[in-house]
Image (tube, rainbow, N blue to C red):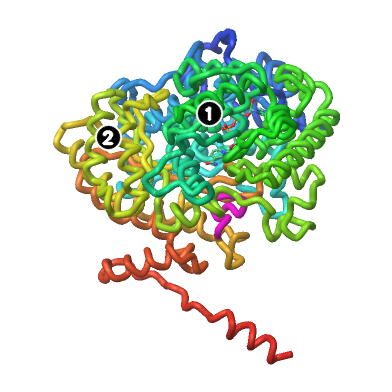
Amino acid sequence: MKNKIISESMDVKLDSIFNNLPEYPEFVKDIRRAPKREADLSKEDIKLALKNALRYIPQKWHEKLAPEFLKELKERGRIYGYRFRPQGNIKAKSIDKYDGKTLEGKALQLMIDNNLDFDVALYPYELTTYGETGQVCQNWMQYWIIKEYLKRMNKKQTLALYSGHPVGLFESHEEAPMVILTNGLMIGMFDDMKHFNKAAALGVANYGQMTAGGWMYIGPQGIVHGTYMTLLNAGRLKLGIPQEGDLSGKLFVSSGLGGMSGAQAKAVEIAKGVGIIAEVDYSRIETRHEQGWLNEIARSEEEAFEMASKYANKGEAVSIGYYGNIVDLLEYAVNNNIDIDLLSDQTSCHAVYDGGYCPQGLTFNERTEMLQENKKKFKKLVDKSLKNHYKQIKTLVERGTYFFDYGNSFMKAVYDAGITEIAKNEENPDNGFIFPSYVEDIMGPQIFDYGYGPFRWVCLSGEKEDLLKTDRAAAECIDPDRRYQDRDNYIWIKEADENDLVVGSQARILYQDAEGRIEIALKFNEMVRNGDIGPVMLGRDHHDTGGTDSPFRETANIKDGSNIMADMSVNNFAGDAARGMTLCTLHNGGGVGISKVSNGGFGLVLDGSKRVDNIIKRALSWDVLNGVARRAWARNQNSIETIAKHNKNNENDDHITIPFIADDDLINKTIEESG
Ligand SMILES: NC(=O)c1ccc[n+]([C@@H]2O[C@H](COP(=O)([O-])OP(=O)(O)OC[C@H]3O[C@@H](n4cnc5c(N)ncnc54)[C@H](O)[C@@H]3O)[C@@H](O)[C@H]2O)c1
C-alpha cells in the first residue's frame, strides 16, 4: 500500500500535529542526560530499527530523519526522536488548560507532562522519569500521538498502548477504562535483559519501571512515606525502639539521592534519626539540597561521620549527603570501627551494568564515559566493586548493624557478580538470600499483609489550596487509635505540608488499607461534587499489597512457593479494568528489573459523580484485597486475620477463601512414617 493512501487513511499523525517538521530542539544545559543504552544490533537489526521508527513519520520527512535516527541509535543506543521533543521544560498545567473531549483524557495528559518535568524526571530528554531506565514511552513521536488520542478520545472509547506505542482508540463503553497500557511484557523464553535490550533498541519494548510507564509518578514523595515507615519499623523491630518512639540518636547509612532513593534523606529526618546517604553524582546532591530534602553535605568520609555523631549525640535529626562512593564510605566505617545502626543501599542495581551502579574507583563522569566506550571493562569494575561492597556489609553485620536490601536488586546483583554465598543455599537465589529484604522483615508482615499501601492523589487544578483541603479531609478519615500503622499514617498526613514534599504537581502519598482508601476516596469525590475542590486523580505505586508479583521485593514474604507466579498481578490488572478504573497498567520489570517481576497499577479520575462512587467501592476494594487474599492463602497470619474479618463484615458482597493450617508435627510424622 502506498504511503499516500496510508496517510489518507488516518487523521492522527505527526503532520496533522505539526504543519512543518519542527526545528531540532536546543538541549538545556545541565539537564541530566541518559547514558548510552545497550543495543547489540546486527546490520539487519539496525535497518529494522530505522524502519520501525520511521513508521511514525510521514514519508516526506523520511530522508531528513533517517540519518538523524541512525545517529541517535549509534550514539544513544535508542531512537528517541529528539527533534519532536517540545522546546524547554514540560510542566503539568492546571486541568482546564488542556484540550480534550473528556476530563479523563485531559487528566492523563497532565499526568504524562508531570512525569517529564525537568524537576521531576531523571533524564527528561530521554523520557525517563526515574529508576535509571523507567520511561513514560519510548520516543517523542509516541508522546505526541498519545496526547492527540487523549484529546480526541470520547467517553465510549479506550486507548490501547503496547510498550508506549499507541495502538489506537477502540470503541468500548462508558464504564470501561479510558486507557489500558502494558510495558515490556515478553514471551517467557525471551524474557531476559539481552532480548529486552534488543527489543527496546528496535523500538518495540519500553521499560515502564512502575509508575513512570504508568504515568502515576509524583516525585520521590511517593517513596518518602514508605521509607519513613520502613526505617521506623526497622528501628522498632531491631533496635528496641518502642511503638510510640522514633529514631533519635540512631544512625542510618545508605546510598542514592536519585529519583526514588532521594526519599531516604527526607524520610530519616522525618523519623527523627541521623542519616548519611552516599551519592556519586553531585548534581543530585545539589537538587536534593536545594529542595530542602537534604540538610548537610559532606565531601569526605571523616566529615560525614563526624557530622553524624555530633547530631546523634544531641539527639537531633539530620540528613547528610556524602559526595562519594558508598563502598568508600563503608570501608571507612569498617576500618575506623564506626557503629552503624541501620544500613541499606538504593543504587539502581536493577540496571547494574547500565549505569545504575557506579563502581568504586570511578567518578560519576568516568562511569558515564566508560559505559560509552568500554562496556566490558565497566562490567568487570562493577563486579569487583559489588564484591567489596558485600565484604564491608558482612563485616558491619557481624558487628551488629542491621542491613536490609531495599528492593533495588542489590543482593541479586551481588550474586550475579559471582558471590554465591549471598544465596541462602549458596548455589542459586531460589531460596532467597542471607540478608533480609525490607519486605521480608518489615513491610511485608507489618504493612502489606494488612493491605496498607502507597495510595496517592493528584489535585488536577494544580492549586495548593486543594491539596491542603484533601490533606485535612484524609486526616479526618483516619482513626489513629485503630492500629499503630494508622497512628503513623495520621502523623504523616498531619505533618505532610510542613515537610514540604511536593515536587511537580500538587500530589500526596498516604499509606492506607482497603477501608481507609475507600473512605478517603469517597470523601474526596464528595468534595469534588460539592465544588470544594477541583477534580482529583487517584492512584497508587505498584509497590503495593495487590498488583505486584515480585519475589525479590513486594512478595518476598510469600512462602507457599507461589512467589514465582505472576497470577495475582495479571488478575489484579484485569480485575481493575473490569471494575472501571480510568487507567489500567501492567509491566514487566518494575523496580527490580526485567523478568524478575510483574507489576501493575491504576489511575482513577474523581469527577464528583455517583458513577465514580460506585467504582471507588468496587474497584479499590478489589485492588487491595486481592493482594491480601493471596497473602492469606500463603498463610501470612496478619492477612488471614484481615480476610477473616472482611468475610464477616461483607457477607453479601465478597467471600474470600482462607487456608486451613496443617500441623507441622503431623506433616513430619506422616513423612517419617511413610519411610
Ligand atoms: N524500595 C522501594 O520502595 C523502591 C522504590 C523505588 C525504587 N527502588 C529501587 O531503588 C533503586 C534506585 O531508584 P532511583 O529511582 O533512586 O534510581 P536513580 O537511578 O534515580 O538513583 C540511584 C542513585 O544512586 C547513585 N549511585 C549509583 N552508584 C552509586 C555508588 N556506588 N555510590 C553512591 N551513589 C551511587 C546514582 O548516581 C543515582 O543518583 C532502583 O533499583 C529502584 O528500582 C526501590
How many residues crowd mark 2 within 10 Å: few (<14), some (14–19), many (20+)? Answer: many
Tell me residue 597's x, y (percent).
60, 50
Horizontal side of residue 415 vs 279, given as left or right: right
Residue type at mark 1: give it. Answer: Gly
* Quarter where residue 286 is shown: top right
Any mark on residue 262, and which?
1
Horizontal side of residue 495 vs 55, given as left or right: left
Can residue 59 be seen by looking at this rendering? no
* Quarter where residue 245 is shown: top left
Give SS at disc 1: loop
Residue 626 in the magenta stretch? The answer is no
Kindly identify the residue that appears in the image at 60 percent across and 49 percent down. Answer: 437
Q: Nearer the viewer, residue 91 or 350?
A: 350
The stretch of residues the image draws in magenta is: 550-557
Kindly identify the residue that appears in the image at 50 percent across and 22 percent down. Answer: 294
**Between marks 1 and 2, how big is the CA–CA gap?**
23 Å
**Farthest front residue in view:** 313
Q: Taken as a whole, is the magenta stretch helix, strand or loop?
A: loop
Q: Name the residue carrying label 2.
A: 471
Give SS at disc 2: helix
